[in-house]
Amino acid sequence: MRKIFFTIALAVASFVASAAVKPTVVEPAHKQPTSFAIVIDSETYAQCRLEVDAYRAALGRDGLAVYMISSTWGSPDQVRAELQKLYKKNLKKMPLEGVVFIGDVPYASVQNAQHMTTAFKMNEERFPIEETAVPSDRFYDDLNLEFEFIKRDSINPLRYYYKLSESSPQSLNPTFYSGRIHYPEQMGGDKYEATAKYLRKVVAERERQEKIDYMVTFAGAAYNSDCLVTWMDERVMLDEIFPQLSRNDHRALKQLNFRMNNYNMTYKLFAELERDEVDIMLFNEHGSPDKQHLDGEEPIEGFDRRAAALRDEVYYYLKREQRKENGDVAGAKEYFKEKYRLTDKFFEEFDNPTPKPASKEDDLVLEEINELRPMPRFVIFNACYNGSFHQEGYVAGSYIFGRGRTVVAQGNTVNVLQDRWTYEMLGLLSNGVRVGQYNRMIATLEGHIIGDPAFHYLPNDGNNLRQEMVTMRLMGGKNDAKYAEYWNALLDAPNADVQSLALRQLADGGKLSAEQLLEKYRKCNYVTTRMECLKLLSRFGGDCPEFVTAVGEAMYDAYEVVRRNAARYASMIGAEELLDECADVLVNRPEGQRVAFTLNTLWQVMPEAATDAALEKVIAACHYPEKSYFDALRKSVARQQNMKRSDVEDAFNKELKPASRVSALRGFRNAPYHDQVPQLISIIGDEQEPLEVRVAAAEALGWFNLSYRRGEILEGLQAISTKEESLAKEIEQTINRVK
């Protein structure tokens, strides 16, 4: 009865939260092939009406039928309901292409969905929800997903917490694209005036109608740029997807690297950011909401550096307590006073914070960015946290609301995978594709468009894919013969990303087999298209022979990012037939540092005897006596195997406390131990095992979605019957993730 009452109370609370003022919906002035929605809070609209209406008119001139939806929004549920209604209404007449959120539109922070991020993995039971939940507008733009309301944030009235339902689809497939225009109040001044000024800038830039003819990239320290092969291959790929840059002007594509720090790299970046002709600027770096980390961290040596490191650590935990609904800052201070013998003076800066000074050489901070005139129309932050629109100050917001011409950015609300495919589908921007459409094709839970998502460049080569793509994707059915005919004709297009897009569309429509994708991989001269083939083949899973074959061949690809992702897929598949190729690459292709780093996981997940045999076979065939190198390699592999041994022993040791076993099972998330699948299924089905251990084992198997043992996992889980609700839900979610 208590449980039923709680459920009813929660439902009522959610309903009350969403039952705010009924939204005002203004219909489009003209019919268009597709529609677009501006979602705005009533006060922002009242304060910025002229600028919002001008922006809406500019979107209309760009071929969009624009809806205006304004309200004093009560909750994300209310916003989502309006978008669902609009989507269904226009599904056949004017399909909803995209949406932009302007001003104080509430947002969802999502739990139980970390597998939809590229790298974010935090213990949702140990850490507060404010840190473990991912702020994400996939709550709005992916209508396939199902969520359960948790609570409203006690400090930030715009932030609401939801859980991804176990019965929901467990992969992203956004229904339309989205973007967010939210002023970072850390910049100071009147937010409505700043929003109006930004919208005037957007309208002005839309009227300029420029092509992409100048691009700058930057690679920061401790990123995959630490491997020079990775960085040099970047140029090969950029020449493929933006051929006009090298063709038109050898100076039109500039690559900067933290190693070029013959003078302060900060000033080099300032110079490029304020250069009017730069169309796109892309940062590959480490980041946080308020910083871009450029040149790496200084070593923690000497008293001053050690003191600063201690202060940063302690202040981090104090801020965490501050963010909690019932946080105990005073108690935390007393704890650290006793632990580190600190005095009250140590906490003065925390209690009375002062503005941060200008950045050191290794950081670009908000105070500096706010003074810049960023000129690239589109800035991409392949970095952690730079797109944290839920913070009072965030890097991406400072760029678009700055004094320059930047109107749109792409950034992330949490941390991201360092080795992800940074440039996927980016070349389509040269074909007139909107930045929102591009972001939709590479969707992650954390990746967002900050600014105008409908912004686009003029096509460079007369091939305007934007409208064709929209109409064929949204209006033409995926089973339509014309749909397949259109995209088949582009499989041999003279543009790498156009070919990749054609492959993606045909695969989405079920028009490409694994055999066809493997053939395309083998025959294609574009490295970026081969990478797309490999990614599409991964959809078939590790029990697909063509995928396994492609991964083995891709270990020797000419393009480093293909080899690196092949190494990652090899560990996720776990098939022993890949060991020979992986061992050969590790020993005989040492120039690929990031490939070698990725292969380290492989030695954990494979059986020890098979791994050792494959490695010794390759070593024995070498024609040079590199004893020290081979000894170091053997030690590295042994360390990885010991990590596995420790995780496995602790996970299955019934003498240990359940909490220790759960902690060990969490290690399976980073390294799927394929040979342990039967044991994991046995734990899940054993009613004598502690419930929390069974749930953790079921959750761990959810990360085996590409394993060659997928069929065994699904069969084993489907055979388990349980009355324990938490376990049943975890099993359901894992099945949905793996199938």
Image (cartoon, helix red, strand yellow):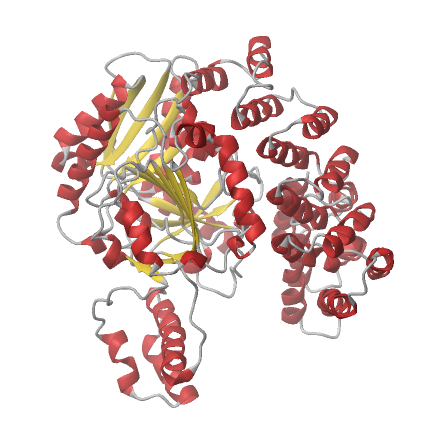
Residue 323 in the image, given as x and y percentages of width and height:
34, 64
Count numbered badges in the picture. Answer: 0
Judging depth in this view, the residue of 722 and 182 nearest the camera is: 182
Residue 323 lies left or right of residue 666; in this view the side is: left
Q: Residue at x 36, y 24 (%)?
A: 86
Between 338 and 215, the one lying in front of the other is 215
Q: Residue at x 32, y 79 (%)?
A: 330
Residue 210 lies, in percent from the top left, at: 30, 26
Res 182 → quadrant: top left
Asked where in the image residue 179 lies, by quadrant, the reply is: top left
Vertical position of residue 617 compared to residue 636: above or below? above
Q: Residue 110 location, x and y as percent?
A: 45, 48
Q: Nearer the viewer, residue 33 or 567?
A: 567
Q: Is residue 195 left or right of residue 670?
A: left
Q: Quadrant of residue 732?
A: top right
Residue at figure coordinates x 29%, y 19% from the top left: 62
- Outermost residue toward the front in this view: 250
Residue 123 visible in the shown view: yes
Asked if 16 appears above or below 679 in the picture, the reply is: above
**Would residue 397 be visible to someone looking at this image?**
no
Quadrant where the image shows the C terminus: top right
Q: Judge whether 387 appears above or below 181 on screen.
A: below
Percent coordinates x, y for residue 525 in the rendering: 63, 28
